[in-house]
Amino acid sequence: MHTLSDLNELDYRCLNIINNDAILLLVNQLCVIILPTETSLVRNACKFLYNLTQNNIKLHGRTFATCKRWILEALEFSDPLAQVDVLIAIKSFLHAGYFDDINHIIHLCLHILHCIILEKLIPNSSDIVGEILGVVQAFLFHGIKGYNVTKPELLHPAAMNLPERIHIVPKCKNLKNYKAKLKKTPTKKSVSDIENSTLPEHTGISKYSSDSDTSDTEFNNSVHIDSKVRLEAVHLLQTLMEISQSREIFGYWPQIVATGSRNDARVLTRSILMEPISKVRQNVLSTLTELLISARPFLIHAEETDHTSFITFFGTVCLMIKELHFTLSLILFTEKNVTVLTHALKCTAALVQGTPYERLKPGLATKLVRNCRSHIFHKDPTVRVAALSIFEAFASSEPITQEILNILAKQSIGGTELGKLQLDSGSISDVGTEEEEIDIEDLNNSVDNCTEIKTSKDESVCLLIRVCLENISNKIISTPVRLQSLKLMGRLAFNTGSLIFPHLEKVTTILISVMEESESQVILHACRVLEIMSGCLANIETYHSDGILFWNIIFDSMISLAQTSQTILREAACDCLGSISGNVFTQLSRQKTILIITILFGAVRDEESAVRAAGLRALGIQHEEIEPFSLEVLLAKLYHISVKAAKDNDKVRWNACRALGLVLSHNPDAILPSSWKDEVFPALSTLICNSPNFKVRTNAAWALYSCNYYGKYTIMLWKSIVLAFENAQHVPSFVEYPHRDALIQQLCLTLARVAACTEKSELQSLWLEIGDHVEEISNVVKQFQETVLPEKLGDLIKAKAQLEQLTKSTCCIEDQQIAQSLTNIFERNRYDYFDVITPTI
């Protein structure tokens, strides 16, 4: 013991130990000889181990294993007085990095979990999702200064009632569809296909070209291992997103994506700002992009809320959107790594696409654009493509707010924004704790060297259009940049024609100039932009007078394009020729009209089906004399198709029900086979009761409502509607909640129509079927009467009048009582705000 005490008296910081093997042997001997119950020896041995770590002496191999085992045994079995020294020794080992292998273990565990989820070896449930997200949250900031090690916890989704958005077919033809035909390569969902053609999605484990990764990771091995843990946590989140429904993931957004407040929460927005390794930042941004794309149907319901004691879930969504704008604006201003910057721009485009700016206070978009606009002049083409895609997202907004219109219509780029191009210093880690928003317009930089685009003499043309036209007309510029510029021009023409059409001749001339190039994608996209412009000139009365000028400029080029050898270009040319308005077509010279018709007739006989279809569409649009259809023939065919389609998937079913309703409203007995009721009424009755989709039920009820006579099926329909009321109380999925009220209303109207067709001879049989449910039906109908507009009560009034007539006309007392009970279903009580409800006698 005296020897150990003497050794501990030495100042190990000043010692130069030459023979490390002797030290290792001594440690090994001490750990074998000293028992945990020998308090004094344990204390001195622990002090000796502590002193060794201060001299940076590393234990390894068997010696380290023996020492580690001895320390753990000492901690468990030694006297409490000695345990203090044992803990000090353990602390020194941890600080010295002896247990760095724990990071390797965590990394491997995260990767194993990633593989298990990917192979679907564990069941996907809400608890599993919450547990995995808890793991992601715990290790997303592993090793980052200011964030302590935490134990993963089970996360619970926020309580919410998310309506399902109906898919709406875009009003504007999408340019990227035509690009897909040219190059059929499978792509992952992303902000745009053009971006993907130049920028692969960096999801999963892959290589990156960043030069800064080496400098970030090689200076310290522990930092490198910490970053691998964080990267694997991001990969785990990406895998979970792939196998989970976007609705399910969105419930965890406040805990994993953004809190809505700029605090030090363990969320992705904070990770982007605090993460020192560019490779991890890049993956976080890529993951956030996918989250934004998948959550778009839910983000549109965000609502602006003032500071109140209670904030709804969609008020929280609004706060999260604002935090995302702040975070991305900040990283666009500070990021220097080109690859990370590109992903940040793509993420910003996804955010713009999902943000309902018309529901939020103005100013949010303006602040974001201040840090985006300068990147459309970036020297790297991938950055320029991503930056232009943000403005395409703004131009695609529905509706275009005044703020967005001002952004798109800006005439020039300010000197402070140009200064952003010259900023070469700064690090993302420098802004990790910054809480005040940094706007580029707040800087006092000034740059005198402006390019020709930024100082164009034609100042009446907005900056974006000048940039796009310059990109399109310059053959030296990268093809993806030109394609993205064409896409942006198409969006601007469709949604903000006031920026394009005052400069119609200039824009059209430049678009036509690319038709002689060899790059087919550029020609194709230019043709699609011309088609969009032609359609706008035809459909918007303000621009009708410009149609002749437009077609005189593009006519020869379009005729030549329709005769090219490339199928996709011939198809595009036919589509463009089909967009000529009737007014313009009649004003063209006879020679030109004959040439157009001749070209289109030739397209109809083309070898390629796509060209034939485009030619037929164009001829159909230009042909004004339409042969009239026989309504009897049309309805009969519609009936057969609709009955068959009612057995198809949900979208086909609800459209089939609407079609059946249309048929039944046009005297079906005179058109359809005599057995039509035997097919239609049972099928519709089954749908209103049992379809898992409430919109299908509603449309089936409307189809029944459209009929004026039900024959022997009146009682069956009464019974089915009563069952439909009961089943509507049990919502099969929370997705159907938004459609439940519409279903109840339509069932009430359909019941009234069926009641109005009830005959005296049916009363007793009807009562046997529904007598026990009259009170429940009455409550539903009266609730409907109190909430519906008065003009919709006509059917209920007719039903009541018919049943009152039956009460008076029948001689049987039992029938009179039944008719009166049925009449009471449609009796409307009048409510007063100050008096209690007085039942009608």
Image (spheres, grey):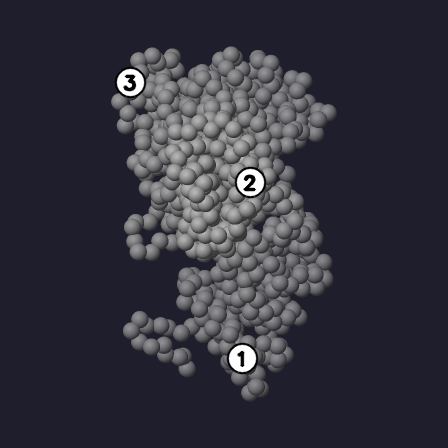
Judging depth in this view, the residue of 98 and 332 nearest the camera is 98
Q: What residue lies at 31% left-to-right and 71% top-to-bottom?
A: 833
Residue 692 at x, y percent in the picture: 60, 59
234 lies above or below 828: above
Report, in whole angstroms, how far the alpha carbon at label 1 lies from the one at label 3. 87 Å
**Residue type at tag 2:** Asn
Image coordinates for residue 779, horizontal then vertical, percent? 47, 73
State the residue in front, 217 or 47.
47
Give the residue at mark 1. Answer: 819
Question: Which label number is shown at residue 446?
Answer: 3
Q: Earlier in the sequence, mark 1 or mark 3?
A: 3
* Left or right: 366 as drawn, with respect to 175: left
Q: Amino acid at mark 3?
A: Ser
The residue to which callout 2 is attached is 28
Query: Could one spot residue 1 in this view of the protein?
Result: yes
Secondary structure at numbered mark 3: loop
- Disc 2 versus disc 1: nearer the observer: 2
Nearer the observer, disc 3 or disc 2? Answer: 2
Q: Residue at x 55, y 69 (%)?
A: 726
Residue 430: image quadrant is: top left
Gap in Å between the C-alphas at discs 3 and 2?
68 Å
Against 283, is 420 above or below?
A: above
Residue 277's label in the rendered image is none
Amino acid type at mark 1: Ala
Q: Residue at x 54, y 35 (%)?
A: 24
Q: Nearer the viewer, residue 835 or 198?
A: 198
Q: Residues within 10 Å of mark 2 (few under 14, many from 20)?
A: some
Circle 1/circle 3 CB separation < 8 Å: no
- Give the secondary structure at mark 2: helix
CA gap between label 2 and label 1 equals 101 Å
- Please identify the quadrant where the C terminus is shown: bottom left
